[in-house]
Image (cartoon, helix red, strand yellow):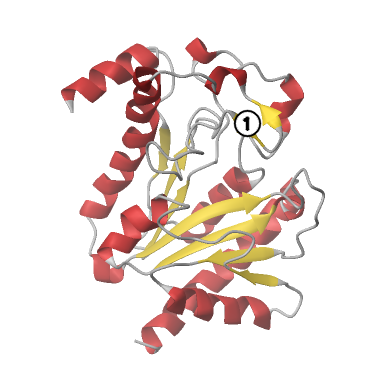
Amino acid sequence: MMSQQNEAGRFLGEDESRPYHVHQAVVDSPFVMISDHAGRMVPEKLGDLGLPRDEWDRHIAYDIGIQEVGRHLQQALGCLLVEQVYSRLVIDCNRAAGHPTSIPPVSDGAPVQGNQGLSAAERQQREDAILHAYHDEIERHLARRKLDETLFVSLHSFTPAMQDGQARPWHIGLLHDHDPHSARLMRELLEDEGDLCVGDNQPYVLNVQNEYSVPYHAGRRNLPALEIEIRQDLISDEAGQRLWAERLARLLPLFWEKRKDHM
């Protein structure tokens, strides 16, 4: 651990942000929320990674709208929220260390010059300073909880269309691997709203090869978990962000009661 701290000290300046921001629980809540792609900060030593300014406003840099949704939702539920504050272009904290897309040299057609030709030591610096530090913080919070009274909620957003232009019809997607039961119960509640197209492992598939956070923190503990993906055009402004936060703040407690009834 000491070597990781030393590496982190060299990578992030003393005045730079830690890789996580913690919104502490203010009530006794079963919900532990995380947001892997909430921020788009870049360590000073990396500059702009060779990307034009407008690329930093795209979905390749962060999950558009999810930081605001998560914060509104945290305030409504009073639960714990741990946000990752650095851009997914610096390192994707929902990928295992060494994953091919962990530090992408190209993202949705955009070359990321600052990520190309990295040495093993340069990759290790980012992993230690950001990836591992963020997940270690989540582990610290989970270690203090009663796991039979915990729901792990991972918040994300997805672009309405990738560079290929193919539209994605889902308003919200529920991703699952070890816990399809929770996804099914939450999908039923969302579909009962009457105005939503709900994706089942869409627009992405959750598994240990593709993702990291839910398998690492919830899967290996067999914790109930939801990975929620909201389409970014629905939460690109404050009105949409509040609307979705209010919807989830209403449905998540209903889901939790429903899940307990089905145990």
Q: Nearer the viewer, residue 76 or 126?
A: 126
Residue drawn 24% across the image and 24% down it: 4
Q: Position of residue 82 (x, y in %)?
A: 42, 45
Q: Position of residue 109 (x, y in %)?
A: 71, 34
The image quadrant that residue 98 belongs to is: top left
Residue 67 visible from this viewpoint: yes
Residue drawn 40% across the image and 18% down it: 119
Residue 80 visible from this viewpoint: no
Mark 1 element type: strand
Vertical position of residue 102 compared to residue 30: above or below: above
The image quadrant that residue 110 belongs to is: top right
Residue drawn 46% across the image and 19% down it: 118
Q: Nearer the viewer, residue 202 or 6?
A: 202
Q: Is residue 83 left or right of residue 39?
A: left
Q: Is residue 187 left or right of residue 122?
A: right
Q: Nearer the viewer, residue 174 or 17?
A: 174
Q: Which residue is mark 1?
A: 106
Vertical position of residue 59 compared to residue 203: above or below: above
> Is disc 1 surrounded by few (<14), some (14 to 19) or many (20+) residues within 10 Å?
some
Residue drawn 69% across the image and 78% down it: 193
Q: Position of residue 19 (x, y in %)?
A: 41, 30
Vertical position of residue 261 compared to residue 146: above or below: below
For the C terminus, which image quadrant? bottom left
For the N terminus, which image quadrant? top left
Quick one: which residue is furthest to the bottom in this view?
262
Q: Position of residue 212 (x, y in %)?
A: 40, 50
Q: Nearer the viewer, residue 101 or 43?
A: 101
Q: Amino acid at mark 1?
A: Val
Vertical position of residue 110 compared to residue 125: above or below: below
Count the marks: 1
